[in-house]
Image: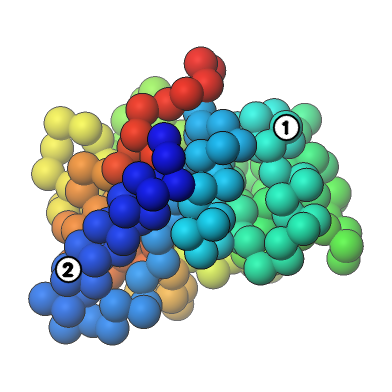
Amino acid sequence: MTIEAVAGNLAVVRRRIDEAARTAGRDPRSVELIAVAKGHDAAAIQAALEAGHRQFGENRVQEAGKKWPRILAALPDVRLHLIGPLQTNKVREALALFDVIETIDRPRLAEAIHRERRPDHRLRECFVQVNTGEEPQKAGVAPADAEGFIRRCREDWQLPVTGLMCIPPVDEEPSLHFALLADLARRAGLTKLSMGMSADYEIAVAFGATEVRVGTMVFGHRAIVP
């Protein structure tokens, strides 16, 4: 995809985010667009960077490790979010690559991050992933367990938890899940909500998303086979 195409796509998505925020009575500046680069090559990422974009998401540590170190070294204002599952044996590498890990979902992972974390690592924020649909095949803590897990992340493992993340079931109304996540965040005193993807990000903005994760609408279909 050309630089012009990626820049145009970013502008369209950003405009739609801004319109959804204004309709909801929100400041458009309160919503960040995370451009999901999973499956996209260095040329696509460079096109987004040249368009001025600086917030990106990746699903896999191994893929990110091949694409991002040089970019992160050259552009200190880029923020990289891990939005896919994190295995405990990849924690050390993830801490060196990602500014935000959005998929904290179990005690063993939280403990591993606490054990491996160092002051010189990039990590500055963590989100707890909530399985709002309680789907057995999907990662995330159950809604009923979220409050206790958030407290343990903060108190037992000293993680910088600032928000919650969810991926609603594909066959259910997403607004119900976004409302649930927003309520859980309020009760936990968290200010950030990572919710909404290409198909439903405008709905997510209406329900309080502070981050939306959009890939296909920015970069098109994936160029890298998983």
Residue 163: x %, y % from top left: 48, 65
Secondary element type, mark 1: helix
Q: Quadrant of the N terminus?
A: top left
Q: Is residue 79 left or right of residue 141?
A: right
Q: Residue furthest top?
A: 225
Q: Is residue 44 left or right of residue 176?
A: right
Asked if the residue at tag 2 contacts the one at tag 1, i.e. Cβ–Cβ closer than 8 Å, the answer is no
x, y percent for residue 183: 29, 67
Res. 20 mark: 2
Residue drawn at the location 52% of the way across and 21% of the way down: 224
Look at label 1 and name its amino acid. Answer: Lys
Image position, residue 115 (x, y; %): 84, 50
| Residue count near mark 1 (Cα–Cα under 10 Å), binned few <14, some 14–19, many ≥20 | few
> Label 2 crowding class (10 Å Cα cut-off): few <14, some 14-19, many 20+?
many
Q: Amino acid at mark 2?
A: Ala
Considering depth in this image, is 99 or 92 the residue closer to the camera? 99
Q: Which mark is residue 66?
A: 1
